Amino acid sequence: MELPFWCLLLLSCLQSLSAHNDFFTSTGQMTDLLYTEKDLVTSLKDYIRAEENKLERVKRWAEKLDSLSAAATQDPEGFLGHPVNAFKLMKRLNTEWGDLESLVLSDTTDGFISNLTIQRQYFPTDEDQTGAAKALLRLQDTYRLDANTISTGDLPDPEHQRAKGNLKYFEFQLEKQKNAAEDVSHKQKEPGKKETAEKRKKPKKVSNHLIPERKKYEMLCRGEGNRMTPRRWSRLFCRYHDNNHNPMYVLAPAKQQDEWDRPYIVRYLDIISDKEIERVKQLAKPRLRRATVHDPQTGKLTTAHYRVSKSAWLTAYEDPMIDKINQRIEDLTGLEMDTAEELQVANYGVGGQYEPHFDFGRKDEPDAFKELGTGNRIATWLFYMSDVAAGGATVFPDVGAAVWPQKGTAVFWYNLFASGEGDYSTRHAACPVLVGNKWVSNKWIHERGQEWRRPCGLSESE
């Protein structure tokens, strides 16, 4: 059967998707599913109209024969005594009932079923559904939400019109996950060991450095645990920045503001335009793939539950706008871009996050960037390409810093001291996205090529 044009067009639009595409890890690619579902609804309505039309024809036929047979059976012989009536009876039974049989047996589902069959191969998998359910648990734990809050969609700027209908499903998933976690915890306990009254007492207040990193991370994500004192805060400033009279910024310097003092983190405002953001997203979206991490055990890249997003790499030579963005970073930081990694674009999915990590290679990872031949990652530049309604902050658990997404801005910090030693206070994380769509792009800048440059802000101490 030849597929209709609209079906072929839809199929061509889906070529960039794969059967196992980890949809839950990227909100940007999840939008494709909304259009897929919309097209399926249109196809379903076409099928319903075809079925209604068929039934209407059968109904008219039945009503006509009902009145005819009622009159004929009152005086069968008299009715058939008329030669035209006898002929019509022969004709109906020999031809018209056969036509009716064909009508009733005609299949109006072909278009809808073929469309559905084509698109089902691009539907989310069990892994996607499980990933999304785990994301809800992650959001519940991180932001201290109860099951009712999540299931009813009672979140900042909720867009889920039918969220209340999912209450029982979410509660079931949450309870299922909790039971599984409790079973594991119970098995790990020593047999016969009971919890004492002393253990049930409220724990004493402990200093910040004794708080587990996970707890500090979640506190910062909720807007708690910030360690910036009023005195330190008073030493942070806003300024116009031209990076030692760089020609590109002498007449129109960039707006720069201090976000943190140690490590020194600055934010550049209005540093990437909406037009540039849309172009970057347009280039990145077709090639977004599940973000990976370096496995120290195998030395290979692999996916991990603590990094839930999709990313793509954009090179300077493929589009003039990417080259222009790279040059802007070089002009503002004074750092060489030729040895930097390509621009990485990331989109976070349902509960998307990246738990605490370092951008630079530590002493126990001497070969972390050996294949690049450009040394360690000396600095990180991070563009925020969307606002996030709730969650999604970039946090530094060791120092109690939190930087919140603001579309069109970028943050910058050094990962290494001037000595080349790693600054361990730069360990950071991307908080789970509670509500909204988070797009970022970053540039990892390496040591090689910086030997004869004098960048601003690089600490001389360790």
Image (tube, rainbow, N blue to C red):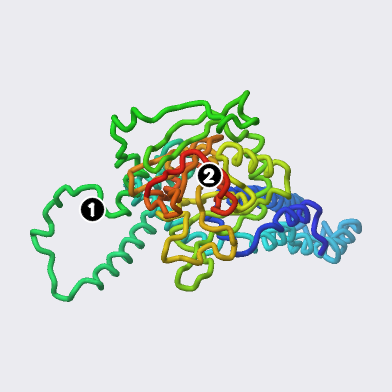
Q: Nearer the viewer, residue 134 or 220?
A: 220
On the question of residue 63 being in view, the answer is no
Please identify the quarter of the rendering in which residue 374 is found: bottom right
Instruction: Judge from the rendering whether residue 158 lies leftward or rightward of residue 224; answer left or right.
Output: right
Q: Is residue 279 visible?
A: yes
Q: Earlier in the sequence, mark 1 or mark 2?
A: 1
- Is there CB contact under 8 Å for labels 1 and 2? no
Which residue does the numbered mark 2 point to in the structure image?
381
Amino acid type at circle 1 is Leu
Q: Quadrant of the N terminus?
A: bottom right
In the displayed structure, does residue 461 sit left or right of residue 126? Answer: left
Which of 313 and 218 lies nearest the eye of the viewer?
A: 313
Residue picked out by circle 1: 210
Type of amino acid at the residue the image marks with label 2? Trp
In front of the other: 119 or 168: 119
The correct choice, above or below, for 6 with respect to 273 in the image is: below
Residue drawn at x 42%, y 54% is 422
Q: Is residue 233 left or right of residue 441?
A: left
Q: Secondary structure at mark 1?
A: helix
